[in-house]
Amino acid sequence: MTNAKDKKTPVELPKLPFAEDALAPVISAETIQYHYGKHHNAYVNVLKDLIKGTDLEGKTVEEIIVATEGKADKKKIFNNAAQIWNHNFYWESLAKGLKKTDKKVDLHGYAGTLDDLKAELAEAAKTQFGSGWAWLVLEKGKLAVVKTSNAEVPWTKDGVEPLFIVDVWEHAYYIDYRNDRGKYVKTLLDFVKWESVL
C-alpha cells in the first residue's frame, strides 16, 4: 500500500476509473456527470488559478496540502487541494466496488465483525454534521473509522492511512437520493466488495 503522503498527484482532473454509468443504480451517470464533471473539475480549476505564479505551482496535490494545512492565509488553497485529493480517493474507493477478488477480508485487529465495521462507518457517514467525509483508515496498523468536515483529510496525522471514503457532501447523493443521506450510505456500503478494500 502506498502511503498517502507519498503519492504524487498532479493538479489535474484524473480520468475516472470506471464508465459514468458503471455504478448505476447505486450512483447514476447524471450524478457522476455533476459530481465529477462540475464539482471536482471546479476544485482543479480554482486551485490552478490560486497557485499560478506562486511557489506552489508545479507541486503535487499532496505537497500543497502538507504546505498549507492549518495556515489561515492559505485556507482556500488547502480547501481546493484537499477536495481534489478526497474526490480522487472517492472515485478510487468506488472503483473497488466493481472488483471482486478472492482475497480474505483482514480486519486488522478490529474488535468486531465486518458487519460491525460497516455499521460503524455508516453511522459516521450519517452523523457527520454538514458537509464532509467518513473514512475507513488504518491507524497505527489497526482499522478505525473517522470523519472529517468539509475539505479535511486524516492522512496528515502520523500513522493514519486511508483505505476507503464515503462522500457526504450533498452533491454526492442529492440527485439520486434527494435528502436521504442514510439511504445513500446504506446502498453505497452494500455495493462495496470489501475484500477489495481490506
Image (cartoon, rainbow, N blue to C red):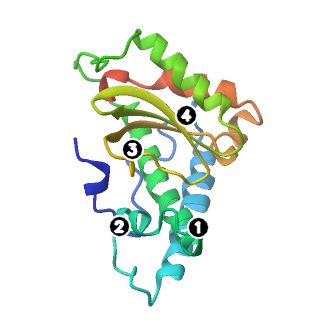
**Badge 2 element:** helix
* Sequence-wise first label, 4 or 3: 4
Residue nearer the viewer, 22 or 187: 187
Q: Is residue 106 above or below residue 2?
A: above
Q: How far apart are marks 1 and 3 (CA)?
A: 19 Å
* Disc on res. 24: 4
Q: Is residue 112 above or below residue 181?
A: above
Q: What amino acid does circle 1 point to?
A: Ala
Left or right position of 167 against 131: left
Q: Do the residues labelled 4 and 3 touch (CB within 8 Å)?
A: no
**Badge 3 element:** helix
Residue identified by numbered label 2 = 63
Q: What amino acid does circle 3 point to?
A: Glu
Q: Within 10 angstroms of label 4, few (less than 14), some, or many (20 or more) residues?
A: few
* Disc on res. 135: none
Q: What amino acid does circle 2 point to?
A: Glu
Q: Residue furthest right?
A: 179
